[in-house]
Amino acid sequence: MNAKTMRLIAAVSVVAIGLATLGAWLAAQPASYDVLIRSGHIVDGTGNPWFAGDVAIRNGRIAAVGRLPNATAGRTIEAPGLIVAPGFIDLHTHSDMPLLADGMAQSKVRQGVTLDVLGESSSVAPRDGLTDGPTEGVKPDWTTFAGYFARVERQGIAMNVISHVSAEQVRRVVMGYESRAATPAEIDRMKTLVSRSMQEGAWGLVTRFESGGPDHPEEIIELAKVVAAHGGNYTSHIGSEGFEQEKEIRFAIRVAEEAKLPVHIFHLKIRAKDNWGTVGKYIRMIDDARSRGLDVTANQYPYTAMNHGWSAFFPVWAREGGPAKFAERLKDPAIRERIKKDKDFNTWAKEHGWWEGIVMGRAGSEQNRRYEGMRVSEIAKRRSDADPADTCLTLMAEDGGRISGMFHTMSEDDVRLVMRQPWVSIASDGSAINLDAPGVPHPRNYSTNVRVLGYYVRDQHVLTIEDAIRKMTSLPAEILGLRDRGQIREGFAADLAVFDPATVGETNSFEKPKSYAKGVQYVLVNGVLVIDKSEPTGAKPGKAILGRGYKH
């Protein structure tokens, strides 16, 4: 070996030693992150037991999880004694328009919700040719999902959103309020609109029926097959959670069988006192379907009262043709008398809690706002009406059928039984609102998730903390098919909720619902703090998360 070669080898060796030394020095330097949550009890969303550790965030993603003693960050949150969980995913909401009216979403983010799923009953799109529908004071300037998502991100929102496309909405675009069977050409038009919606980012098809299920089931099957081809799911808001629930659950299972896609059922429950204790029958139906390999799941809200328009317990013939026709019929005393004697009206009113359980939450006119928060039986006494049914019909006539409210009609034992099922997630059926919301809203808008964590986990021991969080995070993520949310895991989106398990809970009630949750100290959406030391930051880092069928 000559001297030149030896000098070259020596030089290479010096460089190699220098690089190794540099590498060792760099490895010893503390990592720098955007946010570091230190010394928390991490409940990762999978249902596994909590573990002590740190969570580091960089560029909107979870960059590291575990013991990170040398890590540094632009913002460090000390979390000893606090639970660090994935942000909560609400599978059933009506936040479509409220998020445009007020993008702060305080009723949701203050309880740790970082993602709302929209679209039940009437979805934001398609709106081709439509001029009516719920707007909550927002003027729609879009006709497609692409247009709605663009407006959401242009205005800014504090949380993320996903939306389904409503079969009811699609049918109304094509056929208005006609209740007849669609022609082959009309079905093709509906299928085209559903396909377009999926390509624009919708996640699946959602249906909402009158009590007893769809009048035209084959139409629903056809639309569900379109969604399946785009990798979406099917979600069913069944019209009867009482006397005809078996028929409607059977149809949801049929969709899973024939359209070959996952099926999710909104707010599984049993209502009407005569039905209490029978919800196990419907649980067994779903268990049986799952045992046959069908992907059927459900969600629930943790309350014994529900909320929607009073019109829901009026006979279908009275509502046929849409809200304007319904309001017109209510003006006719002879029609009101016919409604009063109708079998469906009496059966469905009983199913909704009867006059002692039906509450006016929001009046349609100024003159009747004095009754908001009162039960029909109480209003009847106030008005000196002998028959509360007359009170109900008169108020609906005065308000053009626009009254909504709560219905105390469920059993606490049934709520607990449903909650314990491993395939049932937690969802609010509420909206992202603030304390200026009109009327007397359902407390679930403000407290669904914290009520589970406080009342059902800490106080009543119905669930463990790990399972409750799984039902709000990884389970809904699996139901939707989300690949990067719902768990505290490296590479996942940094949607996180940090709360005190000793104090987390509700501060409201049915009588006084407008009050924010307590105990949630920090919430991050896409790595940005939207709740900091229990107060909103004003940040709006939320975005629309687009479905598998999305095409650029």
Image (cartoon, grey):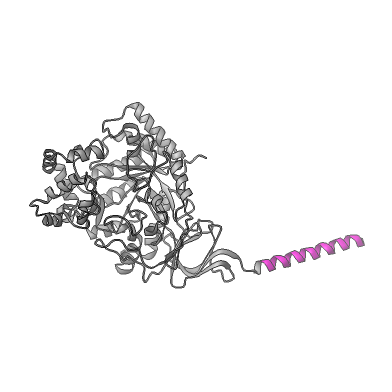
Any magenta on residue 343?
no
Q: Position of residue 268 (x, y in %)?
A: 29, 51
Q: Position of residue 61 (x, y in %)?
A: 53, 57
Any magenta on residue 23?
yes
Q: Position of residue 260 (x, y in %)?
A: 38, 40
**Is 333 left or right of 193, judged from the image as shown?**
left
Q: Residue at 31% of width from left, 58% of height from top?
A: 444
Please identify the residue farthest to the right as the structure is shown: 2
| Magenta residues, dominant SS class | helix
Tally of numbered tags: 0
Residue 462 visible in the current orientation: yes
For the residue pair 1 and 533, the one nearer the viewer reads as 533
Residue 544 visible in the current orientation: no
Tell me the magenta residue range: 1-26
Q: Residue at 70% of width from left, 65% of height from top?
A: 23
Quadrant of the image occupied by residue 43: bottom left
Q: Position of residue 77 (x, y in %)?
A: 50, 69
Q: Is residue 30 above or below residue 552?
A: below
Quadrant of the image occupied by residue 472: bottom left
Please identify the residue farthest to the left as the structure is shown: 386
Please identify the residue farthest to the front as the structure is shown: 367
Pick the quarter of the image with the N terminus: bottom right
Q: Is residue 270 above or below residue 12?
A: above
For the residue pair 492 and 2, the one nearer the viewer reads as 492
